[in-house]
Image (tube, rainbow, N blue to C red):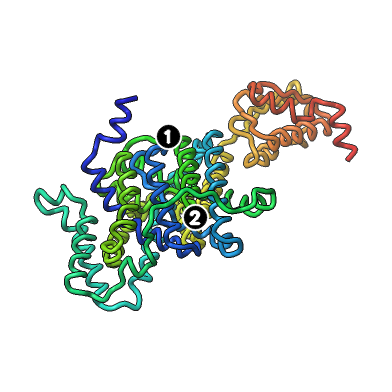
């Protein structure tokens, strides 16, 4: 226990502290922007980001992953805030947390194994595109100074690591933010800063209970929003955890992450913050800046609060161009360039799933829709592929007027028609034996296909024997099949 604690918290102190500082600075404009999207005061997003990051550092299942207020969640809150106000949003945030904890106990985190690699790649690429698109408003209709600062920022980020000794000691995004802020203040550039995004809070958050009536009417209002927030939050968090797993080559506890996200959101709701989840952009910044342990997430959250409450005058001077440069670096680093190179090498089905996921996420700005489409397409392609692995061979004993059919493969909804079509019902035979010892029946569609085959033969006056069913197939056939139940056949024929 002590070794694990040491490994997760103190195995990479310098890297975690420095990367946490970078993330804290990058979180500020994002938290403000997401608050504006949701239609609430900037402090709602900032308090949420502080609380979620600090709490998840202790209770999350993926060390080094950053969770805070996010754009995907903010988009789901717009209607609730507009129609019912902030207090109902806080109540919805609490319920969202409860639903996520329940999901953790139901072990829904394990469902991530059903998300294929091509869906994860599509999700990552779509997020990279969305992160880049989110920077465009900061780069349109501006003076040349902004472009110069952004270019200088990118130059610092990519070239600073090549400097001997110091290049590897300090994260280049942190150097970029500090240097460009210093230049902007010294020269007195008239460019957009963090202070222009919205008013920073000047007090620490306080514990508060949402001022809403505790009745079924309130539940009816907030439940649809809470359910959507819980689903999208878990989906984005688990996908991000999978990506950080790959980046760091370490495993994570997905079910613990579900519970952790729930506890963090309950904490955020009680401190006047909105619901949040894992942030792929910030998590990538953290990992690329050297963050690996829980300390990096804790530092990011606590430093964020210190910066906005006690150092607001300095933080408000940070030019947005510096943060835009950091986010462009994130989008370039997040995008899977290898997936573009592999388009010619990978199967068409894999490419279709990846591209469809990207298109749906980018067009709807909803990560859940994209992943849902990707998973459904991947499942369809898989079912279609497995459906082809079915063979029905036969041998004829002409002397006794008997034919033996040997079925090999998987019989389920995608292969049931192929199974039914493989038999010759018009052949004049005394007896037909269907050997299923090398086959497996998966669902009621497969059982219905077997019933259809047997009953068709019997209608032609042929005796049918079904043998070789394995235990699992026999169970489903006995339960749902009708070909060996005379009363069920009579009932079927009478309809």
Of residues 346 and 209, which is closer to you in this image? 209
Residue 365 visible to an observer of this rendering: yes
Residue 119 visible to an observer of this rendering: no
Instruction: Please identify the quarter of the rendering in which residue 135 is found.
Output: bottom left
Of circles 2 and 1, the one toward us is 2
Of residues 415 and 421, which is closer to you in this image? 415
The crowding category of the residue bearing disc 2, from other C-alpha atoms within 10 Å (few below 14, some 14 to 19, many at least 20), is many
**Is residue 337 positioned above or below 402 on the image?**
below
Checking the image for residue 73, the label placed there is 2
Number of marks in the rendered image: 2
| Percent position of residue 278, x then y | 42, 48
Lower sequence index among marks 2 and 1: 2
Residue 151 lies left or right of residue 480; in this view the side is left
Which structural element holds mark 1?
loop
Q: Which residue is mark 1?
A: 253
Of residues 211 and 350, which is closer to you in this image? 211
Q: Residue at x 53, y 42 (%)?
A: 100
């Amino acid at each position: 226990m002590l070794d694990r604690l040491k490994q997760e918290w103190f195995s990479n102190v310098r890297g975690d502290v420095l990367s946490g500082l970078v993330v804290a600075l990058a979180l500020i404009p994002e938290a403000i922007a997401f608050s504006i999207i949701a239609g609430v005061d900037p402090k709602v997003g900032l308090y949420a980001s502080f609380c979620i990051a600090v709490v998840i550092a202790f209770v999350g299942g993926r060390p080094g992953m950053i969770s805070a207020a996010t754009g995907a969640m903010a988009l789901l809150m717009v209607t609730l805030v507009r129609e019912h106000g902030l207090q109902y949003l806080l109540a919805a945030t609490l319920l969202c947390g409860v639903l996520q904890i329940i999901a953790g106990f139901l072990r829904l985190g394990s469902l991530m194994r059903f998300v294929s690699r091509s869906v994860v790649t599509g999700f990552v690429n779509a997020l990279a595109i969305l992160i880049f698109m989110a920077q465009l408003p900061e780069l349109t209709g501006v003076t040349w100074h902004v472009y110069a600062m952004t270019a200088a920022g990118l130059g610092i980020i990519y070239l600073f690591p090549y400097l001997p000794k110091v290049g590897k000691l300090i994260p280049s995004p942190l150097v970029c933010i500090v240097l460009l802020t210093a230049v902007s203040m010294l020269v007195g550039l008239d460019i957009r800063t963090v202070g222009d995004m919205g008013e920073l809070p000047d007090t620490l958050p306080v514990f508060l209970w949402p001022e809403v009536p505790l009745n079924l009417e309130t539940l009816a209002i907030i439940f649809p929003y809470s359910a959507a927030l819980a689903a999208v939050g878990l989906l984005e968090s688990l996908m991000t955890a999978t990506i950080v797993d790959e980046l760091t080559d370490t495993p994570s506890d997905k079910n613990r992450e579900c519970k952790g996200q729930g506890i963090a959101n309950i904490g955020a709701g009680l401190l006047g913050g909105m619901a949040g989840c894992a942030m792929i952009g910030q998590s990538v910044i953290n990992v690329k800046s050297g963050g690996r342990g829980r300390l990096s997430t804790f530092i990011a959250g606590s430093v964020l609060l210190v910066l906005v409450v006690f150092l607001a005058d300095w933080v408000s001077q940070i030019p947005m161009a510096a943060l835009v440069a950091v986010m462009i670096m994130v989008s370039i680093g997040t995008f899977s360039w290898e997936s573009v190179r592999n388009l010619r090498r990978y199967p068409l089905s894999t490419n279709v799933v990846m591209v469809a996921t990207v298109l749906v996420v980018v067009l709807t700005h909803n990560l859940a829709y994209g992943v849902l489409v990707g998973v459904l397409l991947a499942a369809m392609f898989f079912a279609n592929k497995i459906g082809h692995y079915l063979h029905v061979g036969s041998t004829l004993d002409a002397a006794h007027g008997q034919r033996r059919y040997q079925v090999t493969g998987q019989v389920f909804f995608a292969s049931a028609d192929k199974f039914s079509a493989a038999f010759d019902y018009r052949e004049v035979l005394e007896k037909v034996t269907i050997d299923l010892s090398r086959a497996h029946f998966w669902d009621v569609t497969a059982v219905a296909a077997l019933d259809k085959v047997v009953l068709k033969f019997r209608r032609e006056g042929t005796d049918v024997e079904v043998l070789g069913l394995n235990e699992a197939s026999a169970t489903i056939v006995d339960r749902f099949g009708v070909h060996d139940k005379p009363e069920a056949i009579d009932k079927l024929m009478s309809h």
